[in-house]
């Protein structure tokens, strides 16, 4: 098989994996903050953090360019301080995919953690557990399946990310062209068999992910 | 018709401070609990020096909240909590010992056993280091507790695979494993069916007899209180109505003679 097929597949897997890892970290930590603390503007912040789920990806791409572009507020600082440019790089695609998939993990982590009854945390506290151990040894195991299911969905979403990635990372074959971008290009160029192969790969992958996350959501033990 | 006699309150907070040992529990708190659509005010003031203290009253009288405040799971707005001479909470000096440092064991009303852990893992939970196995001394203690509570055969089962009575004993073993300074029992029998209750009560108290540990039990059940209490703290509508030296009065009076008026007072008293 040639690189026009293999490169987008392996790039998409790498981008989706790194993006999922990033949004998993932020999603679980922020989900825990929302579960544990009451603060003013809590629900408003929840809505803002969930925006990537409902906004058109091109709008997100626009925001990311404003933020991370060469004249962007973060982009300029990254350029000046570290000589790092994210625009038109595959790392930029990771950021786009992470932002888009973040709400899926954040939402499911918050719901799963809120579903852990307070009494379990309290029981651990009376047995001498500091808060970080309560989180790691009580909340995470009890909420783990919900978080894992959200993570699978986030991975699938990151695999399929198109709009924001196109705007921030471009569609450079062999550099930033992910699977979904490659499908678009192949169709435009009339390379029907390449498009078909790519479509098959992404369809099988996403079906697999949805099937596994459905299995994970089925209860294993009841309280 | 209020028939509560103040003279019977042997351990009431007005007792002179010239006692040798500090009281088991000295509590004087004011707490507000906000639930959606309802606000509850708890003003609990009592002192008790016996080893088995029962907080008695109808549901919604504030006895369970008082227990949570003792455990450090509910922060009072003001006041003071002292357990066996240790200050757990003192609003005046800003002391609020967190639950994890109070060394208080608690058996929750529905036990709150960790559903993802086995009976053995539940019992050893409080002794478990973050990484690595239990220390040998703790391992032996867990084995002994499992044996003592009749759970040896069930050690590998999950809470949803065992009976209500077995769950209760698991919760008790888990609370005892950390060798607490004070054991709190929150309505330990309400989750059990009536026929099972009597047997479990006898079993539970037989186990507790072997531990020389002060205990506070919350209950609205006359039989529980009668089997358990040395000191009785009667609650009604968020306040302590009376502190009764139950053991002493029980020598001359029947349980109903002591408890019925308290229940009546709790029901009729207006705040």
Image (cartoon, rainbow, N blue to C red):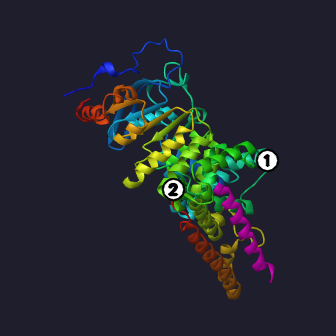
Q: Earlier in the sequence, mark 2 or mark 1?
A: 1
Q: Nearer the viewer, residue A134 or A95?
A: A134
Q: Is A10 included in the stretch rendered in magenta? A: yes
Question: Is residue A66 among what the camera can see?
Answer: no
Residue A179 is labelled as none
Residue B249, given in percent of the width and then of the height, sits at 35, 27
Q: Horizontally, is B259 left or right of A28 in the view?
A: left
Which chain hosts label 2? A
Residue drawn at x 59%, y 73% as measured from the top left: A210
- What is the C-alpha distance between the residues marked 2 and 1? 38 Å
- What main secondary structure does the magenta stretch of the protein show? helix
Other-residue count near label 1 (Cα within 10 Å), few / some / many at <14 / 14–19 / ≥20 = few
Q: Residue furthest left?
A: B1
Who is closer to the viewer here, B155 or A53? B155
Mark 1 falls on what kind of element? helix
The image's mark for residue A111 is: 2
Q: In this view, does A133 lie above or below A191?
A: above
Residue corresponding to mark 1: A82
Question: Residue drawn at (42%, 54%), measured in percent from left and top?
Answer: B196
Q: How crowded is mark 2: few (under 14 residues within 10 Å), some or many (20 or more)?
A: some
Nearest the camera: B1 or A173? B1
Q: Residue furthest bottom?
A: A193
Q: Is mark 2 on a helix, strand or loop?
A: helix
The residue segment tinted magenta is A1-24
Name the quadrant of the N terminus of chain A. Answer: bottom right
Q: How many marks?
A: 2
């Amino acid at each position: 098989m040639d690189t026009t097929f293999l490169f987008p597949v392996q790039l998409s897997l790498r981008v989706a994996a790194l993006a999922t890892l990033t949004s998993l970290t932020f999603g679980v930590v922020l989900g825990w903050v929302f579960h544990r603390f009451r603060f003013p503007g809590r629900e408003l912040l929840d809505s803002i953090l969930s925006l990537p789920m409902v906004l058109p990806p091109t709008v997100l791409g626009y925001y990311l360019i404003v933020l991370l572009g060469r004249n962007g507020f973060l982009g300029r600082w990254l350029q000046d301080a570290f000589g790092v440019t994210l625009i038109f790089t595959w790392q930029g695609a990771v950021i786009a995919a992470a932002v888009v998939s973040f709400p899926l993990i954040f939402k499911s982590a918050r719901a799963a953690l809120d579903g852990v009854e307070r009494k379990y945390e309290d029981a651990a506290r009376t047995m001498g557990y500091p808060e970080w151990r309560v989180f790691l040894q009580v909340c995470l195991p009890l909420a783990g399946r919900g978080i894992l299911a959200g993570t699978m969905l986030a991975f699938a979403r990151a695999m399929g990310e198109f709009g924001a990635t196109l705007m921030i990372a471009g569609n450079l074959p062999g550099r930033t062209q992910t699977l979904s971008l490659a499908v678009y290009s192949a169709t435009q160029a009339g390379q029907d068999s390449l498009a078909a192969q790519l479509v098959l790969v992404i369809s099988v992958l996403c079906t697999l992910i949805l099937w596994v996350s459905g299995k994970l959501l089925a209860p294993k033990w009841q309280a | 018709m209020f028939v509560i006699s103040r003279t019977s309150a042997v351990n009431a907070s007005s007792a002179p401070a010239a006692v040798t040992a500090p009281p088991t529990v000295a509590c004087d708190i004011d707490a507000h609990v906000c639930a959606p659509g309802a606000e509850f005010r708890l003003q609990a003031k009592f002192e008790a020096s016996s080893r088995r203290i029962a907080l008695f009253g109808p549901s919604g009288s504030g006895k369970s909240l008082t227990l949570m405040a003792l455990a450090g799971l509910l922060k009072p707005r003001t006041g003071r909590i002292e357990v066996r001479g240790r200050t757990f909470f003192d609003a005046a000096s800003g002391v609020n010992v967190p639950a994890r440092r109070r060394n208080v064991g608690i058996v929750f009303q529905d036990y709150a056993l960790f559903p993802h852990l086995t009976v053995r893992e539940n019992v050893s939970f409080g002794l478990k280091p973050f990484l690595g196995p239990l220390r040998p001394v703790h391992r032996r203690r867990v084995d002994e507790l499992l044996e003592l509570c009749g759970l040896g055969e069930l050690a590998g089962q999950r809470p949803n695979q065992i009976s209500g009575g077995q769950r209760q004993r698991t919760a008790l073993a888990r609370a005892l494993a950390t060798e607490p300074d004070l054991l709190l029992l929150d309505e330990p029998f309400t989750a059990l069916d009536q026929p099972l209750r009597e047997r479990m009560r006898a079993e539970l108290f037989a186990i507790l007899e072997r531990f020389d540990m002060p205990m506070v039990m919350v209950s609205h059940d006359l039989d529980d209180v009668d089997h358990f209490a040395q000191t009785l703290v009667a609650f009604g509508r968020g306040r302590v109505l009376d502190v009764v030296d139950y053991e002493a009065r029980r020598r001359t009076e029947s349980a109903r003679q002591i408890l019925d008026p308290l229940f009546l007072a709790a029901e009729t008293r207006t705040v």
